[in-house]
Amino acid sequence: MSSRRRVVLRLPVLAVVALAVVAGGGLAGFRYLDRPEKAVAADGPDPAQTVEITRTDLSQAKEVGGQLGYGGSSTVKSHSTGTITWLPKANTVVDRGEVLFRVDNKPVTLFFGSTPLFRTVGKTPASPPAPPASPPATPPAGPPPSTPPANDKPLEGPDIRVVKENLTALGFLPKTTTDKLTSATTKAIKDWQKSLDQEPTGVIDPASVVVLPGAVRIDALKAALGDPAAADLLGVTATDKVVTLPFDADAADGIKAGVKVKLALPNGKNAAGTIRTVSTDATPPADGDKPSDGNKKPQLIATITLDQQSASKGVDAGPVQVTVPGPTRKDVLVVPVAALLALREGGYAVQVVNGTTTSLVGVQTGMFADGNVEITGTGLEAGLKVVTTS
């Protein structure tokens, strides 16, 4: 009366996952050798040990820990030869045309651009010639000496364009079309100087302007009032918060510029972000002030911008959980990995519940993700119950 039973091995979850990893992340395309026979009728399984087959999406997205902040800090230096008389407060945002600091109570303002001012911009009035000590006793022989023509060639170059573009953006110059210093530029400089309650000389001392790529947030004060001006004065950052994401250099799959990510922010809000930059120089991970562990893997750094800055309102720094998208399988049948049965002759099956009996149905596995596995097999559909480990 005994009948031959096909031997099945219900693997622990970790064992099945290990098999999946060895097989290349999914055992896709595996062909089981023959169809499992129906299991002998048995009492219905405990409902707590069954689960329904579902139809859903699977994704191998990965979660990595990042840090919210304002990114790296840079130093603002002064080339003035005076005394610091005013400095902004920490966390202040300084925009184009606004005062960064004061030297001898004179403002040093912020211009946007990529070329610093490296010379005086504007025409310095010529000094009148000194009168002769005494007229010559007799006029010199020959024709009077000719006066060399004045060099009226206007200043031009990238620093002049920086001045003109900023004066245009601030509303003092109608438009910027050339790199040359013109009479319209000189007038605009004077008007700008008047707005700062300065003498309208039409000449800009390069020490009176700091050129940076954009608006800055004051991160730290590196000098104090009364200090000599020619020194490092301010630590500045960008004005928008970003997420800094360190990750192992050998786990860079999916982490590249332009990729959209999900962010769990320290204020409890979920937000979207975009990877903007990824470093290319791998460095050993630092452990605070301690030397890095030689067994730890070298890391790269990704910088992520928030799609909406308002999502981080109320918090300037803190840990962030970053979800980086991975390969996805859409609209597939899914069961927990614990529902898979390993067959002695090879392959896998699931134990389908049919009322008070169960039967084994051979399956092919696809993607493994988050403790679940994609399956295909004859007669399988969403809603069927299968036995799983508790």
Image (cartoon, grey):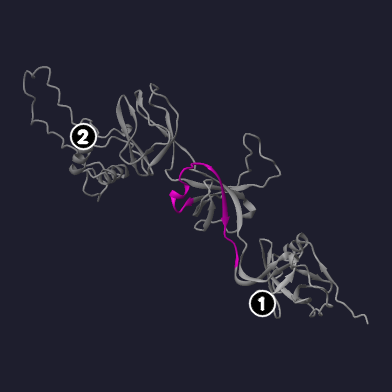
Residue at 57% x, 60% y: name it: 325
Marks 1 and 2, Cα distance to the nearest angstrom?
79 Å
Q: In the image shown, does 55 or 43 lie closer to the viewer? A: 43
Relative to 250, is 3 above or below? below
Q: Is residue 311 visible?
A: yes
* Kind of element beneath mark 1: loop
| Residue that badge 1 annotates | 381
Residue 1, quarter of the rendered image = bottom right
Marks 1 and 2: which is nearer the front? 1
38 to the left or right of 138? right
Relative to 84, is 46 above or below? below
| Residue that badge 2 annotates | 194
Residue 384, quarter of the rendered image = bottom right
Residue 120 is labelled as none
User: Mark 1 Cα within 10 Å, few/some/many (few <14, many 20+)?
Assistant: some
255 to the left or right of 352? left
Q: Residue furthest left?
A: 138
Q: In the image shown, does 328 or 246 lie closer to the viewer? A: 328
Where's residue 251, x and y in %? 63, 54
Q: Is residue 208 magenta?
A: no
Q: Residue furthest bottom?
A: 1
Q: In the image shown, does 260 or 236 lie closer to the viewer? A: 260
User: Mark 2 Cα within 10 Å, few/some/many (few <14, many 20+)?
Assistant: some
Q: Is residue 318 magenta?
A: yes
The kind of residue on which mark 1 rests is Glu
The kind of residue on which mark 2 rests is Lys
